[in-house]
Each structure stands twice: as C-alpha cells, then as structure tokens.
Image: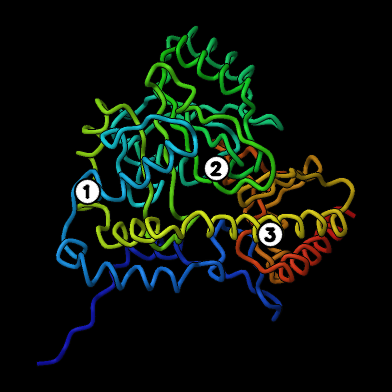
C-alpha cells in the first residue's frame, strides 16, 4: 500500500504566508536580534535544574509525570506564596494563587472570565503586544491610556474615564505592567499607583497587574505592587518564572481573591499546568538556588543594559531619544516625528539587525510609528555594541 502525503488545501495558502517568519539576516551579515524579550540561554541554571530533575524523577515520578490539579502543584504554590509573602510583606494564602502556563495563559484566562465581545478594556499604551492580542481574541474594545516617564498617566486615565462615563460606557478591566514596563522600561510611581486604585474604586473596574519583571531590578527600591496596595480585592496580579528561571518551563502564576480563583481555574484547559516542570521549579527553589540565580541574572542584564545605553549614546543621531530602564529587558526609542520605524526595519534587516516597530504595541495600528523597542536581554554585550552601531548607521542614512 502506498503511503499518502498530507494534502495542502489552497485556502491555507494565505494563512501560511502570513505566518512565514521573516529572518533578520540580510546582505550576508550575521543576525543580531533586539526584537524579542528572550532570556539569555547562557544564564539558564542547567546543572542545578538537572540535579533537581534527578531528584524529581527518583522521588516523585509517579506524580510528576501524571496529570495535575487545575490550580497547580500545591508544593509550588506553597513555595511561591512563601517567597512573595517574605519578600513583599504580603499575607497571600495558597487558595489565592494558581499556577499557569506562563503569564500569557493567566492573561488569557482573565480575559475569558471577565470579558464579553464589545466590552471595554483600558490598556496602557504602548503595551505588550501579547496582551493586546489576548484581549482582541475576546472581542474587546481596546481604549488606550498613555504611559510617560512616571508610568501610567493617571491624569489622562481620569479624563478617559470621564469621557467613557459620559457616553454610558463602563470599562471592565485595565491592564498594566507597572515595573520596567514592556515595551518602554518605565516604572509607575507610588503616587500614580495609589491614584490608579482610587480611580478603579470610583469607576468600578478590575486591574490586571502584569508583574513579569519585578525581580529584575538593577537599582533602587520598587514601590509596592498594586496587589499589595489594593484594599478592595479588585487587583489580579500575574507573574512568571520565564524571566527568572527558564522560559521553557512554561510556568507563571495568578494571584487574586480566593473567592474568584475557582472560576478562573475552571477556565484552564491544560489538564493541570505541567506537573513535571512545577515539581522541578519547586525542588530547585527549596534547594536555595533561586535567589542566588536571580542575583546573577540582575548583574548580567544590568551590564547589558549599560552597554546598550552607552552604544545608543555613541552611535544614534542626536534627534533620537530613548528611555533609561532601571530593570527588565527593554529600551524604548523615539524617532523624529514623521519617521516610520517599520520602513527602517527593512534597511536594518539588510544590515542583519532586527527590532520591534512601535506600532505593534498600540491598539491603533496607525499609532506608534515613530517608535521602536530594543530588547537587550538576549544578545551578548559585543553583539549589542555591534548591533546598535549598525542600527545607528541605518538611522544616520534615513534621517540625514
């Protein structure tokens, strides 16, 4: 019997073409990507994770390799809750936490639980494109709230809420990354966090706090989280092991009122978020490995940040400005008015450099054209220096 090859229906042609990756290489030059906030694989704690995996497989294989609980592995929840309570002076109980397949799943589950098609979601702008897409998939109407050097602009938010109230619109949710924001790298001040909570109480909406980068602080103390400041139980807070341990573990978490968590857990479709990697992360943490590892990450990413900022100052035209993040993975670049970063991307790729055009980070695809995001997390310091030099040359040519 002759084996049959799978057929390819013509209706897939456009979809596949749209999904086809666009390589960052060009002109025969080595590719240097600033496009994605990927952790540096050289910093993965491979040996320690290997040792933890051996313990898990020897002692817990019957449970670690089985389906798991919807809420997540109790051992990991206990480790996580204890760490957050100790570090931030919180009083989270295990039934106020669930494990997710990264922060992305947490955001998607919140959207599915709270949003109906046509509901209004307030999104800080620019925003992480993954969150924008998650809310779009729920059929939400996205309303932009600007971010400036002090974080989410609560003055502008107040004006937006007044306008929405006048037209009879009740927003259901506000999404924000208050620490080392993706994509700008800025941090929302304590005064604005308190103002945001006041507005949420006055206009009765829920806040989804995406705190993926809190542990990657390069200098200074961070304000308390919105979750910690919230007296009303209207803040849901998500975090992730992707930035502080290994992205491939696909482990994140969601904190919220324990009366709400069961509804959110019921919307997870994963058969229990990876029991094996959950056991792995719990065993690794209980061995005392996580905090020293985070300290190493902070030192390495701080150095990369410093190399990028120095290179930007050295190679970029004076008409270009950028943020100076105190942590996280990103620098946000502002080009002169009328410049379209998407047009510059073609020339940059010819030089073997990739970045994220700013329009990807706005609900309105016509906005953000004169911005771009640079991620310093993945390239080596030498690659950062060379990549910014190449990109500076592209900008010099484009801007005259």
Q: Residue at x 71, y 70 (%)?
A: 383
The location of residue 400, given as percent across then percent down, is 90, 55
> Picture quarter containing residue 322?
top right
Q: Would you place residue 310 above or below residue 262 in this image? A: below
Viewer-nearest residue: 1 or 171: 171
Q: Would you place residue 357 above or below residue 397 in this image? A: above
According to the picture, the residue beneath numbered tag 3 turns out to be 345
Judge left or right: residue 383 versus residue 73: right
Judge left or right: residue 228 versus residue 398: left
The location of residue 338, given as percent across then percent down, is 78, 42
Q: Closer to the observer: label 3 or label 1?
A: 1
Q: Which mark is residue 193?
A: none
Q: Residue at x 69, y 66 (%)?
A: 353
The location of residue 177, given as percent across then percent down, is 54, 37
Q: Would you place residue 191 above or below residue 20 in this image? A: above
Q: Residue at x 50, y 18 (%)?
A: 197
> Picture quarter containing residue 192?
top right
The location of residue 326, given as percent across then percent down, is 69, 44
> Picture quarter containing residue 300?
bottom right
**Residue sticking out furthest to the bottom:** 1
Spatial separation of the CA atoms under disc 2 and disc 1 = 28 Å
Q: Which mark is residue 214?
A: 2
User: Which class describes the residues within 10 Å of circle 2: few (<14), some (14-19), or many (20+)?
Assistant: many
Pointer 2 and pointer 1: residues touching (CB < 8 Å)?
no
Judge left or right: residue 88 versus residue 150: left
Viewer-nearest residue: 82 or 127: 82
Q: Residue at x 90, y 48 (%)?
A: 318
Spatial separation of the CA atoms under disc 3 and disc 1 = 38 Å
Pointer 3 and pointer 1: residues touching (CB < 8 Å)?
no
Image quadrant containing the N terminus: bottom left
Q: Which mark is residue 269?
A: 1
């Amino acid at each position: 019997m002759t084996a049959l090859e799978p057929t390819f229906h013509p209706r897939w042609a456009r979809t596949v073409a749209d999904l086809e990756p666009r390589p960052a290489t060009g002109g025969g030059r080595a590719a240097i990507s600033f496009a994605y906030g990927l952790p540096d694989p050289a910093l993965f704690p491979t040996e320690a994770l290997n040792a933890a995996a051996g313990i898990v497989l020897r002692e817990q294989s019957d449970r670690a390799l089985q389906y798991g609980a919807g809420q997540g592995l109790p051992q990991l929840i206990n480790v996580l809750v204890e760490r957050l309570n100790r570090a931030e002076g919180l009083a989270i109980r295990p039934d106020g936490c669930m494990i997710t397949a990264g922060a992305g799943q947490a955001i998607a589950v919140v959207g599915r639980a709270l949003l109906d098609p046509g509901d209004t979601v307030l999104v800080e702008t620019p925003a992480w494109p993954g969150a924008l897409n998650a809310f779009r998939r729920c059929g939400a109407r996205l309303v932009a709230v600007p971010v400036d050097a002090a974080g989410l602009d609560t003055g502008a938010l107040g004006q937006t809420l007044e306008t929405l109230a006048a037209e009879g619109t009740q927003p259901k949710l506000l999404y924000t990354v208050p620490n080392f924001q993706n994509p700008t790298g800025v941090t929302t001040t304590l005064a604005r966090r308190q103002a945001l909570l006041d507005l949420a109480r006055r206009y009765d909406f829920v806040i989804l706090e995406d705190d993926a980068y809190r542990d990657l602080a390069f200098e200074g103390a961070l304000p308390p989280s919105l979750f910690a400041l919230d007296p009303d139980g209207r803040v849901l807070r998500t975090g992730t092991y992707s930035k502080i341990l290994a992205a491939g573990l696909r482990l994140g978490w969601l904190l919220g009122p324990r009366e709400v968590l069961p509804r959110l857990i019921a919307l997870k479709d994963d058969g229990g978020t990876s029991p094996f990697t959950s056991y792995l992360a719990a065993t690794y943490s209980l061995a005392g490995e996580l905090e020293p590892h985070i300290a190493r990450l902070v030192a390495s990413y701080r150095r990369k940040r410093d190399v990028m900022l120095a290179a930007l100052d050295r190679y970029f035209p004076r008409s270009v400005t950028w943020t100076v993040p105190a942590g996280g993975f990103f620098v946000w670049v502002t080009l002169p008015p009328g410049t379209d970063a998407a047009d510059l991307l073609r020339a940059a790729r010819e030089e073997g450099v990739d970045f994220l055009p700013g329009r990807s980070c706005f609900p309105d695809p016509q906005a953000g054209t004169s911005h771009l995001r640079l991620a310093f997390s993945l390239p080596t310091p030498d690659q950062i220096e060379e990549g910014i030099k190449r990109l500076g040359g592209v900008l010099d040519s484009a801007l005259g």
